[in-house]
Structure formats: structure tokens, C-alpha cells
């Protein structure tokens, strides 16, 4: 059904009469000055063959011709909206740039699931490198020589050329694509990506160490009196540590006195922990 609609569109476009310069200027003036929709329709229909011809140049990218034509039609409408008939330029000359730009943007967005560069240099590299590479391969052997020569011709770095060469030479691979080994259950490519997380054995070892230190600290807190314990719990062990001023106000003492009691309590904890657990010697409780 879609192929039939596409053929009918192409046939209709090819049958549309060419516009004489005077007729084209009249239609452009009517649209430009009066927003005459009928004039716009007549002008764009007469130039749809230009859109179809341009779409054929992008057929090697493997995208549906109907989608390319649709994008080209958007570019044609954009050209009509911006065209100034007073400049004396043929509409087809002006519209060609907009049609090509619209199709190029569509190709860049949809040719690969990996978004490429959108700078003018990157666009030029994407659309010109394949043909240039085929020409250079006839006279040059190694890929590095081809990359160097193409970089000079296109005004980009050899690294950019090498990266584009890799993109154009291989298809996209989905990380969810299945990978099957004989005798094993199927897995996805995602399963073989290296993880940024620490190995499981290190994670477990760290958890055990943390639990052990927590038990040691709980036992060591028994050496503190009630006021020291309150200060240490609220200053050092609470998620949001209390300020010296807040504790001083709650205990009825100055903030300097709170600091002194805290320092004394920390020293008592350090002494107990290093005596009972020599491996902690030199660390802070």
C-alpha cells in the first residue's frame, strides 16, 4: 500500500508542469505578500520533482524513500516561507539548499542509533567521506594514508576521519541483542559489559569490616559518662551533627566546654579501641 502511494506521488510530481519565470515570480509574490495558499500549493507542487530527485541521492543510506521525500517537502515549504522574489533568483535554485539540508538532518538523526556530530565539518565528513574513500582506495593502500589525505581534503582531523570510517564500516549493535553459546543459556550483550561497581568479594569484605568496627565502637562507648556519651552521639554519630552552641544550650554549659568534653571523650574512645584492637592504631575513632 505504501509503495503504491509513493508511486502515485512520484507520478503526480513528474506530471506537474514546469513554471515559466514570470509564472513562478507571480506565484511567489502572491504567497509572499498575500499569503495566498493556492499560490503556495501551485508553487510547491511544481517543484516536487526536485524533492524526488534529491531523495534519490540519499538512497544509499538505507532509509525509506517516502520518509526522505516527506522531509524534503518540509524543506521545500521552508524555502517557500523564506523566499524573496524581489531578489530575482529562481525558486528552484533557492529551494535546493533547503531541501538538501532537511534531508541531511533526517539522515543524521535516523541513519544510526548513535547520534553523530552536527557541526558543518562533521556533516561534510559524513556525506562526502564514503565517495572520497572509494576514490582514494584506488591510489592508496593503508587506511592511515586514506585518513590523512581525506582529512586534508575535508578540513577535519585524521582522528575524526578514522572515527567516521569505523561508523560507516560497521552496523549498529544493540546491547539487548542475544548472544548464544552452545550448551549455555542465551544472554544479552549488556551482560558482558564491565561494571563500574566494586567486585562482589570486595563489597562483602567492606560490609563485614564496617559491621565489625561498628560493634567495636558500641563496646567502647561504655567507657564514657552520660554527658560525654550524649555529646559524642549528637556530634559524631548523628546524621546531622549538632552544633557546639546547640549542645551547650541543651546542657547548660558554654560551647567551649562542650568542645573540651568532646575532645576528652574522643581521646578515651581512641585509647580503648587501640588497646583492644591494635589494628586500629593510628586511626580516628
Image (cartoon, grey):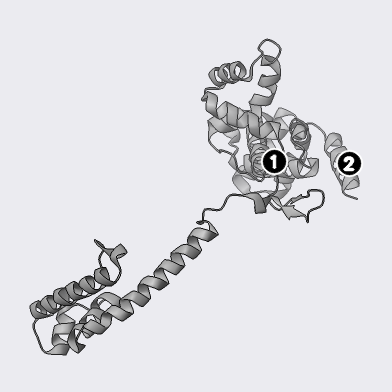
Q: Residue at coordinates 17% horizontally, 72% vertically from top-left? A: 267
Q: How far across and how far down the image is residue 137, in percent?
A: 69, 15
Is residue 275 rendered to the left or right of residue 67?
Answer: left
Q: Residue at coordinates 79% horizontally, 44% vertically from top-left? A: 66
Q: Which image quadrant for residue 266? A: bottom left
Nearer to the camera, 110 or 193? 193
Question: Which residue is label 1 attached to?
Answer: 111
Res. 238 visible in picture: no
Q: Which mark is residue 7?
A: 2
Q: How far across and how far down the image is residue 184, in percent?
A: 78, 53
Is residue 189 rendered to the left or right of residue 240?
Answer: right
Look at discs 2 and 1 and give the one toward the viewer.
1
Q: Earlier in the sequence, mark 2 or mark 1?
A: 2
Are the residues flagged by discs 2 and 1 in contact, CB closer than 8 Å? no
From this view, report whether residue 39 is shown above or below residue 54: below
How much space separates mark 2 and mark 1, taking CA atoms?
A: 24 Å
Amino acid at each position: 500500500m505504501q509503495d503504491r502511494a509513493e508511486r502515485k506521488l512520484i507520478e503526480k510530481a513528474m506530471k506537474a508542469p514546469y513554471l515559466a519565470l514570470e509564472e513562478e515570480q507571480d506565484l511567489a509574490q502572491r504567497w509572499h505578500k498575500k499569503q495566498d495558499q493556492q499560490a503556495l500549493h501551485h508553487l510547491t507542487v511544481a517543484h516536487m520533482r526536485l524533492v524526488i530527485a534529491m531523495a534519490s541521492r540519499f538512497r544509499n543510506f538505507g532509509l525509506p524513500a517516502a520518509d526522505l521525500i516527506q522531509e524534503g517537502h518540509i524543506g521545500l515549504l521552508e524555502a517557500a516561507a523564506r523566499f524573496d522574489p524581489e531578489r530575482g533568483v529562481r525558486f528552484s535554485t533557492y529551494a535546493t539548499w533547503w531541501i538538501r539540508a532537511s534531508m541531511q538532518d533526517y539522515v543524521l538523526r535516523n541513519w544510526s542509533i548513535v547520534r553523530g556530530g552536527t557541526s558543518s565539518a562533521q556533516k561534510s565528513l559524513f556525506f562526502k567521506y564514503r565517495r572520497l574513500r572509494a576514490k582514494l582506495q584506488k591510489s592508496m593502500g593503508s587506511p592511515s594514508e586514506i585518513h590523512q589525505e581525506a582529512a586534508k581534503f575535508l578540513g577535519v582531523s585524521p582522528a575524526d576521519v578514522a572515527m567516521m570510517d569505523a561508523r560507516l564500516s560497521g552496523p549498529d549493535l544493540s546491547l539487548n541483542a542475544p548472544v548464544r553459546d552452545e550448551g549455555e543459556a542465551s544472554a544479552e550483550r549488556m551482560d558482558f559489559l564491565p561494571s563500574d561497581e566494586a567486585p562482589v568479594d570486595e563489597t562483602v569484605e567492606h560490609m563485614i569490616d564496617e559491621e565489625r568496627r561498628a560493634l567495636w565502637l558500641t563496646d567502647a562507648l561504655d567507657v564514657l559518662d552520660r554527658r560525654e556519651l550524649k555529646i559524642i552521639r549528637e556530634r559524631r554519630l548523628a546524621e546531622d551533627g549538632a552544633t557546639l552552641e546547640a549542645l551547650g544550650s541543651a546542657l547548660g554549659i558554654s560551647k567551649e566546654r562542650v568542645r573540651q568534653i568532646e575532645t576528652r571523650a574522643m581521646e578515651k574512645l581512641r585509647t580503648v579501641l587501640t588497646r583492644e584492637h591494635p589494628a586500629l592504631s593510628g586511626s580516628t575513632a
